[in-house]
Amino acid sequence: MAEHGLSEAARAAADALDAGQLAADLAVLVQMPSVTGDEDAIAAVLADWLETLGMAVEVFTPNPVDIRDDPAWPGEEVPRASLSVVLGRVGRPGGRRLVLSGHTDVVPAGDPATWTLDPFSGAVVGGELYGRGSCDMKGGVASILGAVRALRDTGALEHLDGELIVALVPSEEDGGQGTLAAIRAGATGDMAIITEPTQLELVVAHAGAITFQLTVPGRAAHASRRTEGVSALANLATLITALEADETRRNEAETEPLMTALGMPYPTMIGKVVGGEWASTVMDRVVADGRYGVRLGQTDEEAADELRACIAAACEADPFLRDHRASVEITGARFASSRVAGDHALPVGLAAVARAITGTDPAQIGVPYGCDMRLFINVGETPCVVYGPGDVRLAHGADERVPLAEVEACARVLAAWVVEELGVQPA
């Protein structure tokens, strides 16, 4: 009789987790500063680990130029010469296939003085492991490794009645080129889980985001004759007012409960402004970079059309900008939105396993940010959810950290889920 709804093999896999090795692996990963654009070293380590665990491993290194020519190219924000994708495969080809995926890149650590500990220490304090990328998302990567190790240690890995792919990818933080490359190399299947930080809740829907650059004109004049010039900075303020009104309209129009629960699922913001050449000259040009939310159900290009329409209408309403238009360029990452139905077998089955392992029923949630889930769904035609350890509010900040208990719980759930979904052939 299955215990708590799980098969004996699934329960055995969950119970076989080596928590000490998992924590040690995570510390090593965090101590490797794999900032976006520099992921080759960590890819080599992960490839060796997966091979040792019994997977057939390929380090797939497509030319970044070729990826940029792909019609589904998701943009980039960091120049790169390489793109190291680690693919591990095990099990019986031709049957059902599952994908476990995580990204290896992290954002820069910022000012070390703002951290309590060294940003790449991997130190454990109060049951939490600290360091850049610990939460986003090396904790999730370590959970995948821990699950594969548990499957190996119980003998289930070599007898899976189906195929398991582990895809560990670069370049998620600046768009998702790594996952696109993995998909083109065959990392698709019947279901996929990305172990980004969710505090072990189930992300079934996410918004997206595009980055943009506004170039806003003005007319230069000497400061002593300021009123004879037109400040590009003041014109930018006019456009920001229009963007704020647009933000309010777009968020108030949302009716999906998963997204309305977030309060503001589709934020717009300006994060960088450059302009002016002389303190006593009226600015004749300002360049502003920002982020624009992609609504649930939208493609990134549809969101870009909304942004362009907002700026065009604001220019048309302004006497100066009507004849001296601001320009909009879509730059950097392009995160479309995506979702999987709440009653799909993936979230339903994963929730059942999580409930049996942790005693807690994970909530289905929507999130206001983009991730590689949309590439698996929209490009790879693979149903996908996000489920992983850590609080995303700690990502990208000083003192980033992840609770080891959540990393362990995630690994146990993943190991049991793989067995429940694929089954194990008799030895």
Image (cartoon, grey):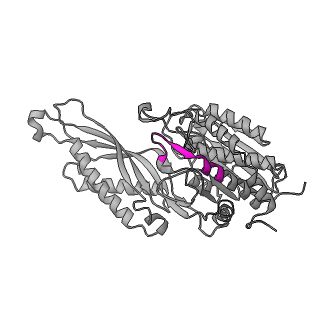
- 336 and 399: which is toward the camera: 399
Q: Residue furthest front?
A: 126
Residue 157, given in percent of the width and then of the height, sits at: 80, 49
> Is 391 within the magenta?
no
Q: How many marks?
A: 0
Residue at x-position 50% and y-position 32%: 118
**Above or below: residue 382 compared with residue 236:** below
Specify start and end residues of the magenta stretch as a single range: 394-409
Question: Where does the C terminus fall, quadrant-wise?
Answer: bottom right
Residue 415, given in percent of the width and then of the height, sits at: 72, 53
Q: Is residue 172 visible?
A: no
Residue 175, given in percent of the width and then of the height, sits at: 52, 45
**Above or below: residue 80 compared with residue 320:** above
Residue at x-position 75% and y-position 64%: 6
Q: Quadrant of residue 33?
A: top right
- 261 and 254: which is toward the camera: 261
Q: Is residue 294 visible?
A: yes
Question: Where does the N terminus fall, quadrant-wise?
Answer: bottom right
Residue at x-position 51% and y-position 44%: 75
